[in-house]
Image (cartoon, grey):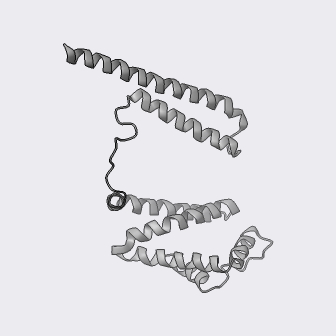
């Protein structure tokens, strides 16, 4: 509900703050205000999400609409340095995630009705625990290497990450070998 008044400020074309542009927060909001149609769009979406959240029948839709909005606000307050406002917005994000989890079954049913049933086997159906662990290690390695390329993680982590990835490949191949050997033993037992 807190974003309905702030959304109305934007939707009616008013400035959000009177801070000078020399202040990073004031500069950010002035730049957003100068975008014109985007400023109005942000305001209308905030008001729409807030109103949908207030009505029990549309609260789930409102929460889904509000998720990218509050996530953006958290990143903005964190990136620009809004002080303790960051913790307020993080609390709002956590509350929204709780609401989405509360209605998780409704969301999954809606997604399943749109996507439809799966016609093929699942991605890791029949994989051994060793193979699954290998895929997880490779996933973490890939994410780590991506963070290195974006300078979020020091470049000195590259070699250890590659070693970790090699461990993942070994686990995957070991899992495959276990599956093949177990398959041979089960076929021999079935032939007897």
Q: Nearer the viewer, residue 111 or 65?
A: 111
Residue 74, image x, y percentages: 59, 62
Q: Nearer the viewer, residue 25 or 61?
A: 61
Residue 30, image x, y percentages: 73, 76
| Residue located 58% across and 38% down the image | 142
- Is residue 10 positioned above or below 104 on the image? below
| Residue located 65% across and 43% down the image | 147
Residue 29, image x, y percentages: 69, 74
Residue 11, image x, y percentages: 58, 83
Task: For the C terminus, give its image quadrant.
Answer: top left
Q: Nearer the viewer, residue 84 or 125?
A: 125
Q: Is residue 130 left or right of residue 11?
A: left
Q: Residue furthest left?
A: 192
Quadrant of res 157: top right
| Residue located 49% across and 68% down the image | 66
Quadrant of res 88: bottom right
């Amino acid at each position: 509900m807190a974003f309905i008044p702030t959304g109305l400020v934007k939707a009616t074309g008013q400035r959000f703050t009177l801070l000078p542009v020399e202040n990073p927060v004031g500069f950010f909001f002035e730049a957003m205000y100068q975008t014109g149609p985007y400023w109005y769009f942000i305001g209308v979406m905030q008001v729409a999400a807030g109103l949908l959240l207030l009505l029990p029948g549309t609260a789930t839709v409102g929460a889904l609409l509000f998720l990218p909005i509050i996530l953006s606000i958290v990143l903005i307050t964190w990136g620009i340095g809004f002080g303790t406002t960051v913790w307020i917005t993080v609390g709002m994000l956590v509350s929204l995630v709780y609401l989405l989890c509360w209605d998780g079954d409704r969301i999954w049913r809606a997604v399943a009705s749109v996507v439809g049933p799966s016609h093929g086997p699942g991605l890791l159906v029949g994989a051994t625990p060793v193979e699954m662990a290998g895929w997880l290690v490779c996933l973490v390695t890939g994410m780590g290497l991506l963070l290195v390329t974006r300078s979020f993680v020091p470049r000195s982590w590259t070699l250890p990450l590659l070693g970790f990835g090699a461990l993942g490949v070994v686990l995957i191949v070991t899992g495959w070998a276990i599956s093949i050997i177990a398959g041979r033993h089960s076929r021999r037992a079935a032939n007897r």
